[in-house]
Amino acid sequence: WLLPGHKPQPLAASFTYPRPPDTRALERLLGANLQFDAPYNSLSFSPRDCAMALPSADPALDVLHMEYARTRLKLLLDGSMTAQVRRVLSERLAQGGPSDLRHIAQLVGVSSRSLQRRLGNEDMHFSALLDEARLMLAHSFLRNSARSVKYIGALLGFRDQSSFHKACRRWFGMTPGRYRQEG
């Protein structure tokens, strides 16, 4: 309804997560050029589609969106608290070091409460960042190392193998051993 007669179709779509078992719905929506395990999520469109004016465009809303985009870009470039915590969490988990809120806050140089507040200002929660870092490292270790599943679970801070198995089922839809085999 926005663009009668022409529906913009992405040239490519990239996702930070591993390839799911069934990509048919994504392919119907975004086309066949899908990339998984990418460093960031993105959609790429042709220059023609990007230059197309929207008949329902609102200049006042455009100003608001541009200001929001500039603010978000500044946060990303200046090293937002979310970006700092992501970096520190990945390093600590990969080394098997403590990765709880108190330790991570100490490493980024703020109190636990300040860390929670600053992440909240960026619409983020520490638990979500910890889960994301664990997912990325679990994927990498299961697909690219010969380390045992038990060792990887312990390295990522899971108290027991059962907890790691449950997390892998949530992330990948399968056990860690099966995820490794299918890689």
Image: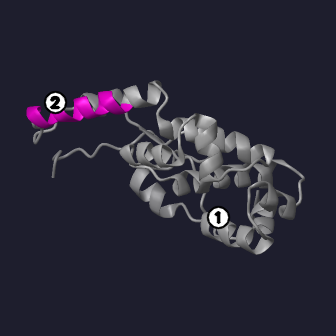
Q: Which residue corresponds to mark 2?
A: 63
Viewer-nearest of labels 2 and 1?
2
Q: Mark number for residue 10? A: none
Q: Which amino acid type is marked by label 2?
A: Val
First-in-chain label (2 vs 1)? 2
What is the CA distance from the residue labelled 2 to the residue labelled 1? 40 Å
- The colour scheme used here is one colour
Residue 65 on the magenta span: yes
Residue 161 lies, in percent from the top left, at 79, 70
For the point 67% across and 43% down, the residue is: 90
Q: Which residues are magenta?
A: 59-72
For the point 75% across and 75% down, the residue is: 162
Residue 77 lies, in percent from the top left, at 46, 25
Q: Give the quarter of the image for residue 181.
A: bottom right
* Number of other residues with Cα within 10 Å of mark 1, as a class: few under 14, some 14 to 19, many 20 or more: some
Q: Is residue 124 visible?
A: yes
Residue 112 on the magenta span: no
Q: Which residue corresponds to mark 1?
A: 172
For the point 46% across and 33% down, the residue is: 80
Q: Nearer the viewer, residue 41 or 71?
A: 71
Residue 151 lies, in percent from the top left, at 86, 59
Residue 168 lies, in percent from the top left, at 68, 66
Q: Is residue 38 visible?
A: no
SS at mark 1 in the image: helix
Residue 109 position (above or below residue 176): above
Residue 138 position (above or below residue 71): below
Q: Which amino acid type is marked by label 1?
A: Phe
Q: Magenta-highlighted stretch: main secondary structure? A: helix
SS at mark 2 in the image: helix
Image quarter (top left, top right, bottom left or bottom right) of the C terminus? bottom right
* Number of other residues with Cα within 10 Å of mark 2, as a class: few under 14, some 14 to 19, many 20 or more: few
| 67 displayed left or right of 134 | left
